[in-house]
Image (cartoon, helix red, strand yellow):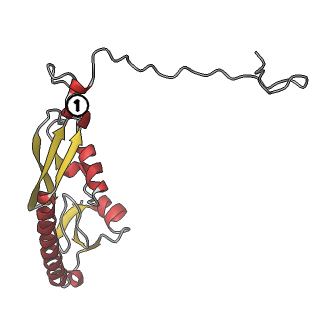
Amino acid sequence: MLVEVLLHTRIDKLGAEGDLVKVKSGYARNFLLPKRMATVATMATKHHIELLRKRRAEREAAEFQAAQEFASRLQKLKLLFTLASGSEEQEKVFGAVTAQHVADRLREEGIEIDRKKIRIDRPLKEMRTYSLSVDIHPDVTALLHVELVPPAEQAKGKEAKTKGEPRKRPASKKTKHSAPSKGETASSDTSA
């Protein structure tokens, strides 16, 4: 059985504030009504629709304006990611940049964006500049520029490394020495 309700808040895939929608009675009774997201549409509540629609239009205009300003701010930004790569002959890259990496870097810049709103078809692996689409608002999409660069020491050139230079070995693990017993002293013998 379907019930007509008046929405008080925006609900994804259902409607926005002030909409009259028909939903199943269990959904209305168990979710929408207890959380005060909607009320049952009666003749008295239908009079409030016009007021709610005016509020909704004002809110949506403000959100759209804020989204456009945010999009222009994002388009001016360029994120650099450093990926390790193999030898120059192979041009192999180790690792990749995903939407989560981009969202984390934006968070470091003071910009909060959900990673699901950043459109990346597949992880970024090539050393070049990418233009990613970011869904900020249903009607506003921004372009974010992301550049993948090699590490600084590799970019300077590998000629600084000489062929005869020995490889550094990791420090050996030190063994624990037992504490001296009561009769022994902790001093070292330097008379030899």
Instruction: Name the quarter where the C terminus is drawn.
Output: top right
- Tell me where residue 24 appears, x and y as whole percent: 25, 59
Name the one closer to the observer, 111 or 186: 186
Q: Dot 1: within a 10 Å radius of its alpha carbon, few (fewer than 14), some, or many (20 or more) residues?
A: some
- Tell me where residue 89 appears, x and y as whole percent: 14, 19
Tell me what residue is drawn at x 15 percent, y 53 percent. 134
Name the one closer to the observer, 14 or 161: 161
Tell me what residue is drawn at x 32 percent, y 59 percent. 26
Reply above or below: 137 against 147.
below
Name the one closer to the observer, 100 or 191: 191
Task: Residue 140: tell me if it is visible.
Answer: yes
Residue that extends furthest to the right in the rendered view of this protein: 183
Reply above or below: 166 against 1.
above
The residue tagged 1 is 154
Reply above or below: 160 against 15.
above
Please give left or right for residue 95 compared with residue 180 in the image.
left
Type of amino acid at the residue the image marks with label 1:
Gln
- Tell me where residue 51 appears, x and y as whole percent: 18, 84
Please give left or right for residue 104 compared with residue 170 in the image.
left
Q: How many marks?
A: 1
Task: Residue 98: tell me if it is visible.
Answer: no
Quarter of image, res 17? bottom left
Q: Circle 1 sits in a helix, a strand or a loop, which is it?
A: helix
